[in-house]
Amino acid sequence: MGGAMLVSGAGAASAAAKRDAEIKIRDISPNPVAVQRGRTTTAYFDIGATRDVRRVELSVTPAEGLRTMRTKDVRDLEGWRFAIGFNEHDPSGKWRATATAYDRFNRVIARDSAFFSVYLKRSKADTRVERFSADPSSVRSGRTIGFSGYLQAENRGWRGVRGERVNVYYRASGSSAWKWVAAGTTSWNGKFTAQTRAFRSGSFRAVYAGDERLDSATSRTDYVRVYGPVWRR
């Protein structure tokens, strides 16, 4: 039946038999199962059973509707434990796990079900800061330095991102510390501008911190020479 995965395992058997056989899905970990694009997340199913259970089958299927799924690699672990891998091709939402117990005559003697969830993590889009510049490249102390650049995100090609804050940092010549000096907000095409006062020669760079949708990015550095007034006696 479409939408189901079936695995079998064998455990320690006992000659003793019980009329009221029991089986229980004790734990599903992790739950929910978070899947990232391009990767596989393994979920572990821990099942408890009475001594008269000779074989256990575990099936998992989306709880709503029947969906055809690809064949999966399933590991049968010791002690009625199973491992199943989920990836981005599995439907997100509520799933049902069903454990079925069989006796030594291969008869169904008990069954238990439990629910768990599978969801696809939203990956952040790559970003970059392009054409960053600090102008002019040589300026008198106290004058204005202007900054500009473009914030872009990858979405089937690089496109400008609107309404995002980009910070500009400064590192004085001979120093290793970066200090915030200005910030700008991107326009419809991703362009941002900002400015600050010239104080001392050094390098500037633009940094985008990112958010829940977009990854962070840092521009190339741009050097500005700052010169002061010439004092004469």
Image (spheres, rainbow, N blue to C red):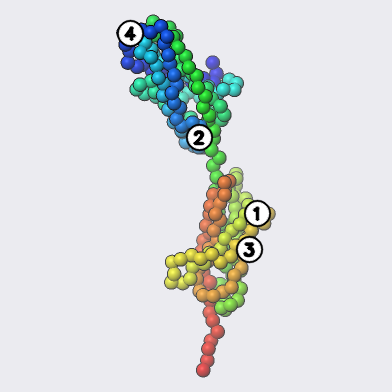
* Horizontal side, residue 186 vs residue 168: left or right: right
Compare residues 17 and 104 and report the one nearer the observer: 17
Q: Which mark is residue 193?
A: 3
Disc with the residue nearer the chain's start (1 vs 3): 1
- Judging by the rendered image, the residue that carries numbered circle 4 is 16
* Sequence-earlier tag: 4 or 2: 4
| Mark 3 touches mark 2? (CB < 8 Å) | no
* Mark in the foreground, 1 or 4: 4
Instruction: Find disc 1 in the rendering and name its residue.
Output: 163
| Other residues around mark 3 within 10 Å, as few (<14) / some (14–19) / many (≥20) | many
Pinpoint residue 105: horizontal percent, then vertical percent.
39, 5
Label 3 sits on a secondary structure element that is strand
Name, please, the residue furthest toward the bottom: 233
Q: Amino acid at mark 2?
A: Ala
Picture layout, residue 122 above or below residue 75: below
Circle number at residue 34: 2
Whether 218 is drawn above or below 121: the answer is below
